[in-house]
Image: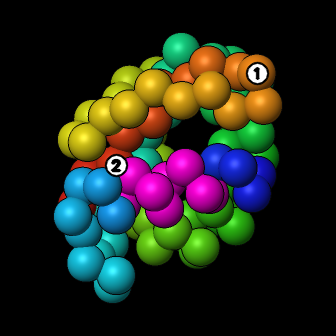
Amino acid sequence: VREIISKIQNMRKEAGFEVMDKICVSAKDNEKITNILHKYEAQIMEEVLAQKVKYEEAAGFVKEWNINGEKVTLGVEKM
């Protein structure tokens, strides 16, 4: 969970979002990571200021990551 939060925070910064911008997070291409994201959705959303999480697609600023050996595509977009 910490790694997922870290990657999303890095993406917020790379996309040039302001600290208080509300975002939508999206994830695809890895069932294990999306299951973790779903299970800890409330915690992750709170920490990254997300208002919505989408699964099975990646939108906005998109990047592929290797999280603990698992490849996943994450996306962040401003709400």
> Compared to 58, does 18 lie above or below?
below
Residue plotted at (41% across, 65% down) = 51
Q: How many marks?
A: 2
Describe residue 33's horizontal placement relative to residue 63 as left or right: right
> Compared to 16, does 53 lie above or below?
above
Q: CA distance from mark 1 to mark 2?
A: 21 Å
> Compared to 16, does 18 lie above or below?
below
- What colour scheme has been applied to the protein in the rendered image? rainbow
Describe residue 12's horizontal placement relative to residue 7 as left or right: left
Name the element at disc 1. Answer: loop
Describe residue 74's horizontal placement relative to residue 36 as left or right: left
**Is residue 9 part of the magenta span, yes or no?**
yes
- Percent across and percent down for residue 68 are 78, 31
- Percent across and percent down for residue 78 are 22, 61
Quadrant where the C terminus sits is bottom left
Describe residue 65's horizontal placement relative to residue 2 as left or right: left
**Is residue 54 part of the magenta span, yes or no?**
no
Q: Circle 2 is placed at which residue position?
A: 76
- Percent across and percent down for residue 5 are 62, 57
- Main secondary-structure element of the magenta-colored stretch: helix
Whichever of labels 1 and 2 marks the residue nearer the N terminus, that label is 1
Name the element at disc 2. Answer: strand
- Percent across and percent down for residue 9 are 48, 62
Q: Which residues are magenta?
A: 5-12
Residue plotted at (33% across, 84% down) = 20
Pointers 1 and 2 in contact (C-beta within 8 Å): no
Residue plotted at (70% across, 67% down) = 43
The tag on residue 69 is 1
Closest to the observer, 34 or 65:
65
Question: Is residue 52 at least partly visible in the picture?
Answer: no
> Compared to 24, does 67 lie above or below?
above
